[in-house]
Structures are given as C-alpha cells and as structure tokens.
C-alpha cells in the first residue's frame, strides 16, 4: 500500500495518498497500534483485499476532522475504511464517498468503535450489506449524533447494516 504506520502517529492535513495497491490490508494507508489524524487531504483510488483506502488494526485510532476518502475499492470488506477489533474511528468532519466493496461496508466496515459526529458518508456501493457502513460483530459499537448517511447502495441495507451482535445508538 501507500503508507504503513506501526506504533506511530500520522497527521494528514493536505496532499493525497492515491493509486496504491495492497494484496491484503490498507491500499492507501495501513495503521497498526497507531494514531491517525486527518484534517484535510485526499485518500483516493487505492485498492486492497480489505480497507481499500484505510485499514486500522490493533488499537489504532483514526480521528477524521476533514478531507476526503473516495473512490477506493476492496475485493472483500471496507472499500473506504476497514477497522478491526480494538480500533476507534471518529468522524467529526470530511467525506467518505464513492467507495466500493465486493462484500460488506463499502464506505466503512468496522469491528471496533465508531462515532459519527459530523461529516458525510455518501454514494458508496456494496455488493452485499451496508453500502455506507457495516457494524459487523459483537465487538462493534457505534454512536451517531450528527452527520449525513445518504445515497449509499447495498444488496441489503444500503445505508447501514448492524449485525452479529453489534450495537448502534442514534442520538
């Protein structure tokens, strides 16, 4: 993929991570035990098996305040963003749009903690469930208190899928 961060901190405020490929996780960015802060910039046109744009693993966090994650693709889950167990994704601004996945969670696929405070998750397309977002199993906990989830497509649950014991609260 484009950038690999293990045990570090990455702040993206401008520029782009684009046109990268990974055969496994994180076509654009793969973070393990790391903190990622996105204030601006673009993550686009990347591809991988899971997490076409971004993959978070092992206690990593992504705090998104701005920027755009778009037109990334996964051959399995999480076209835009893929989050494993023990991760935290907080979106307070920015856009996740135009991502695709061959299975679930084209915009976002997570087994971790997900918070949507503001920002947009729009026009993502999944061949299965959760075109916009998929909270996948009992380790996934989501809270939506703002933002927009619209114009996403999935064979089932175009906007949002909550399954296998995952928990979602909408305030």
Image (spheres, helix red, strand yellow):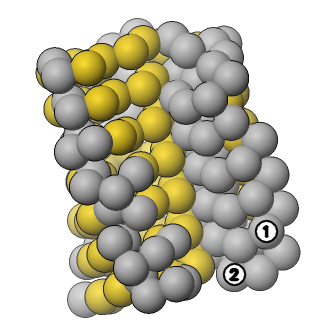
**Category of crowding for the residue at label 2, using alpha-carbon neighbours closer than 10 angstroms: few (below 14), some (14–19), many (at least 20):** many
The kind of secondary structure element at disc 2 is loop
Residue shown at 30% from the left, 88% from the top: 169
Q: Quadrant of residue 27?
A: top right
Which is nearer the N-term, disc 2 or disc 1? 1
Residue 68 in sight here? no
Residue shown at 52% from the left, 58% from the top: 109
Compared across the picture, whether 120 is left or right of 150 comes to left
Residue shown at 77% from the left, 81% from the top: 156
Numbered tag placed on residue 128 in the rendering: 1
Tell me the CA gap for discs 2 and 1. 8 Å
Numbered tag placed on residue 157 in the rendering: 2
- The percent position of residue 32, horizontal first and vertical second, equals 30, 30
Numbered tag placed on residue 89 in the rendering: none
Q: Quadrant of residue 6?
A: top left
Residue 145 in sight here? yes
The kind of secondary structure element at disc 1 is loop
């Amino acid at each position: 993929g484009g950038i690999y961060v293990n045990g570090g901190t990455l702040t993206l405020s401008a520029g782009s991570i684009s046109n990268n490929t990974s055969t496994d996780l994180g076509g654009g960015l793969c973070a393990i035990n790391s903190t990622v802060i996105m204030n601006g910039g673009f993550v686009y046109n990347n591809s991988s098996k899971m997490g076409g744009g971004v993959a978070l693993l092992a206690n990593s966090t992504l705090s998104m305040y701005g920027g755009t994650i778009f037109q990334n693709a996964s051959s399995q889950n999480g076209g835009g963003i893929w989050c494993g167990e023990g991760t935290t994704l907080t979106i307070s601004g920015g856009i996740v749009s135009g991502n695709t996945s061959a299975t679930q969670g084209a915009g976002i696929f997570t087994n971790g903690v997900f918070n949507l405070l503001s920002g947009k998750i729009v026009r993502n397309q999944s061949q299965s469930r959760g075109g916009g977002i998929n909270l996948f199993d009992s380790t996934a906990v989501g809270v939506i208190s703002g933002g927009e989830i619209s114009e996403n497509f999935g064979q089932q649950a175009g906007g949002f899928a909550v399954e296998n014991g995952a928990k979602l609260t909408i305030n």
